[in-house]
Image (cartoon, rainbow, N blue to C red):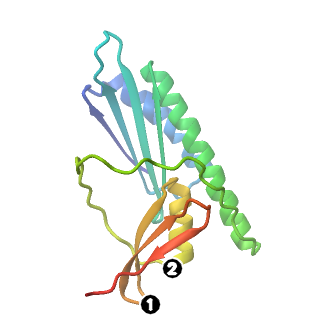
Amino acid sequence: MEMQVTGKHLEVSQEILSYVERKFDKLNRHLPNILESKVEIIREMTKSPQHRYAVQVTLNSRGTLLRGEVKAADLFEAIDNAAKVMDRQIERYKGRLSDKSRGLSPHHPQQEAAAPPPTGKVVKSKRFAVKPMTLDEALEQMELLGHDFFLFFDPTRGQIHLLYRRKDGDYGLIEPELA
């Protein structure tokens, strides 16, 4: 497994790097086909003298992405908790694979809190590779990532589609048409 560890607003020392590697190498035992893992450690800048740390982890297991994020006042506690979150993500993923092989459909819990209407401006732009996949694969990826939407390329239709979670717990699919 290739591991990338980066720091934002802090330098990743050898001690931190060794600790991260020790914690996240254990995940490979639970899911041996992890190709790549990215761990970003962010020291959040606060007005108080104490800092908060966020640890964001993305695992790539043969094209399936598993993601988790944890915040804590202590850096090593944040790393520990991020490893636990990713362990749970892997167990969920393996459970879904098991359910899929037995022909069971996944359970999709309903989101309760509705977001307020947007009032701000675009402050971040992100680029990512859009992979060809079926609607079922896109739904599974969206659930594994814990997102409310997912952009994917449908090779049968030759189009990019947007899958999203509706307030009623069901899903919607946006299929663009040129005007």
Could you tell me which residue is drawn at 47 percent across and 30 percent down? 79
- Furthest residue in direction top, as rendered: 49
In x, y percent, where is residue 172?
51, 72
Q: Is residue 37 left or right of residue 126?
A: right
In front of the other: 140 or 25: 140
Tell me, for residue 128, which label it has, or none: none
Q: In the image, is residue 110 above or below residue 76?
A: below
Q: Residues within 10 Å of mark 2 (few under 14, many from 20)?
A: some
Label 2 secondary element: loop
Q: Is residue 108 left or right of residue 154?
A: right
Disc 2 residue type? Answer: Thr
Tell me, for residue 156, which label it has, or none: 1
In front of the other: 106 or 2: 106
Disc 1 residue type? Answer: Thr
Q: Quadrant of the C terminus?
A: bottom left
Report the number of discs.
Answer: 2
Label 1 secondary element: loop
The answer to whether mark 1 and mark 2 are in CB contact below 8 A is yes
Quarter location, residue 84: top right
In front of the other: 151 or 34: 151
Badge 1 or badge 2: first in the primary sequence: 2
In x, y percent, where is residue 26?
56, 40
Q: Residues within 10 Å of mark 1 (few under 14, many from 20)?
A: few
Residue hosting label 2: 134
In x, y percent, where is residue 75?
42, 22
